[in-house]
Image (spheres, rainbow, N blue to C red):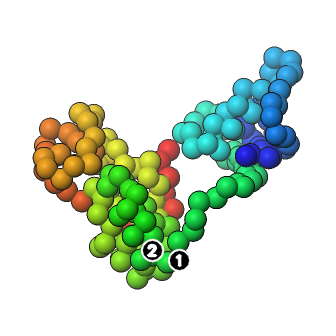
């Protein structure tokens, strides 16, 4: 559950903290008070795309942070090998990502994860045919026969795309 949202320089909001409780939270206010920016901030926290046009006039950047409480966390794995075993058992073989400063762990992950797209230190939002220069996607497949991963006309082969980054997110 999101318990708190902190917003800086987003639309009409200079700086604000909104505490959310369990159940229903109602946001009311006059036109121009920032209700839409609160909803925008919530969307960003949930993985929505950022819009540079929403940055407050005169600010270089906007920031949205949240305090999230998770009572029922899934079981954690112990190390990269267990992570790979978990992915082998439960993954879709489409896109998997590791965030690590450990080059050896990253290399092991890339080598052993059986997915169409494997990312190291980059957002899985890059798992898109357009990002790979394929144009509009015709479809997405996780099978190994014929098309696999993001698919354009020329990609009707089995491929493994490896993306290495240093914290990039898709704008």
The residue sitting at the top extreme is: 31
Q: Is residue 143 left or right of residue 52?
A: left
Residue 81 image position (x, y, % from top left): 42, 77
Residue 43 image position (x, y, % from top left): 63, 37
Q: Nearer the viewer, residue 161 or 168?
A: 161
Q: Is residue 82 left or right of residue 135?
A: right
**Residue located 50% across and 67% down the image:** 99
**Residue located 58% across and 65% down the image:** 75
What element does badge 2 sit on?
Answer: helix
Residue 50 image position (x, y, % from top left): 57, 40
**Residue located 57% across and 44% down the image:** 47
| Residue 56 numbered mark, or none | none
Tell me: residue 26, above or below residue 49: above
Q: Nearer the viewer, residue 18 or 12?
A: 18
Task: Check if mark 2's residue and mark 1's residue have beta carbons within 8 Å.
Answer: yes
Q: Is residue 26 visible?
A: yes
Residue 168 image position (x, y, % from top left): 48, 57
In this figure, which residue is indicated by the disc labeled 2? 82
Q: CA distance from mark 2 to mark 1?
A: 6 Å
Query: Crowding at label 2, few (<14), some or many (≥20) Cα neighbours within 10 Å?
Result: few
What element does badge 1 sit on?
Answer: loop
| Residue 78 numbered mark, or none | 1
**Residue located 53% across and 71% down the image:** 77
């Amino acid at each position: 559950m999101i318990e708190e949202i902190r917003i800086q320089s987003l639309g009409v909001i200079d700086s604000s903290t909104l505490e959310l409780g369990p159940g229903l939270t109602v946001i009311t206010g006059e036109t121009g008070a920032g209700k839409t920016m609160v909803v925008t901030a919530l969307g960003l926290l949930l993985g929505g795309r950022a819009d540079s046009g929403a940055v407050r006039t005169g600010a270089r950047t906007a920031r949205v942070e949240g305090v999230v409480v998770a009572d029922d966390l899934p079981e954690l794995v112990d190390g990269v090998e267990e992570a790979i075993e978990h992915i082998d058992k439960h993954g879709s073989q489409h896109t998997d990502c590791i965030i690590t400063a450990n080059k050896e762990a990253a290399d092991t992950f890339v080598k052993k994860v059986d997915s169409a797209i494997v990312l190291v230190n980059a957002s899985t939002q890059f798992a898109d045919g357009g990002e790979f220069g394929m144009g509009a996607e015709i479809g997405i497949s996780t099978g190994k026969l014929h098309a696999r991963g993001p698919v354009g006309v020329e990609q009707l082969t089995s491929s493994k795309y490896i993306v290495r980054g240093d914290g990039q997110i898709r704008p």
